[in-house]
Structures are given as structure tokens and as C-alpha cells.
Amino acid sequence: MISISKTTIINTAAFSMALTINAVNLALVFYSKERFLATPAQVGILNACYNISYLLACIGLRHVVSRLETRWSMILATGLFLSGVLFVYFSRTIGPAYFGQCIGGIGTAFYWPPLMGWLSAGLEGAALNRATGIYNLSWSTGSIISPMLTGYLSSRNASYPLLLGILS
């Protein structure tokens, strides 16, 4: 049986979630203009909905998040994020898409804080520095690759990056 370390799981999760979140949020620029005929202001609000809801959920739901086991928090986070992306994808107008972005932002509040907490559990000093350095490299790499991948997929079809978000 293959044994996968905690840090491998965490760093892979950080990479894939950063890639997915950034792909979806950048894709919304193209998708919302094509699907909803959104104005630049509406596109900005659509992306802001995600970030504002994430911030408010991190603050307002911190006691709920801290009571959940990490695995349940990750499952809830990815389920909410997926629900948000599906909501946006199937919306016919931009109004419901705003709501979908809020769902995704709230979901993400159940993802990043527990993941970082799990990473740092039992680590101090040099070991903590090394673990957080690799973690930052992982999510940063996902964030770097994401715009290139999103640009390529969007040039084929504006919905492809959202489908990537749904499938990942």
C-alpha cells in the first residue's frame, strides 16, 4: 500500500484549489461578458462578491469552521464551491450569478483556514518555516499556471474554465 504524507496531500490540495479558484474567477470576466452581456462594472461586482463573502465568512463563521474536523471542512468547502460554480454556470442572468459567487466565497472560508491549520499542527521553528514555504510555493504555482490555462481555455470557449472548475 502506498503511503502519502500529510504535506503531500495538503500541498496538492493547495495547488489544485488555487488553480481552480483563480481559473473560475478570471474566466468570469470572459464568461459573464459573453453569457450575461455584463458591463465592466458588473464583472467587477461579480468577482467582488466572491472575495467579500470569503472575507465575511472567515470572520463570521470562524467558530463553526474551528469546530469541524479538517476532512469535513474540506468536503463542505469543495461542495459549496462546486455549488457556487454550478449556480453561475447555469444562471441565465447575472443576478443569480452574484449569489453563486457568494456561495463559492463562503465555501472557500471552510477550505483555506483549516488547511493551513492542519499544515501547521505540531510544527514549530524551522520545520514550520519549511512546511509553510512549500505550501506557499504550491498554491502560488497553481495561481501562476491558472491565468495561462484560463486564457487558453477561454479562447476556445468562455465556459471551458468553468467546466474545469466543476470537474476539478
Image (tube, rainbow, N blue to C red):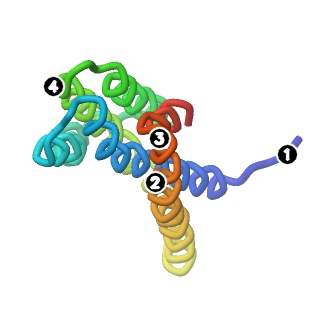
Looking at the rendered structure, the secondary structure element under dot 1 is loop
Q: CA gap, disc 2 to disc 4?
A: 25 Å
- Percent of width and height locating residue 131: 55, 69
Looking at the rendered structure, the secondary structure element under dot 4 is helix
Earlier sequence position, callout 3 versus callout 4: 4
Q: Three-letter amino acid code at disc 1?
A: Ile
Give the number of marks.
4
Earlier sequence position, callout 3 versus callout 2: 2
Looking at the rendered structure, the secondary structure element under dot 3 is helix
The crowding category of the residue bearing disc 1, from other C-alpha atoms within 10 Å (few below 14, some 14 to 19, many at least 20), is few
Please give the residue where the numbered disc 4 appears in the rendered image.
95
Looking at the rendered structure, the secondary structure element under dot 2 is helix
Quadrant position of the N terminus in the picture:
top right
- Percent of width and height locating residue 80: 37, 28
Residue at 26% of width from left, 34% of height from top? 101
Quadrant position of the C terminus in the picture:
top right
Q: Three-letter amino acid code at disc 3?
A: Pro
Please give the residue where the numbered disc 1 appears in the rendered image.
2
Residue at 43% of width from left, 34% of height from top? 159
Q: Is residue 125 left or right of residue 28?
A: right
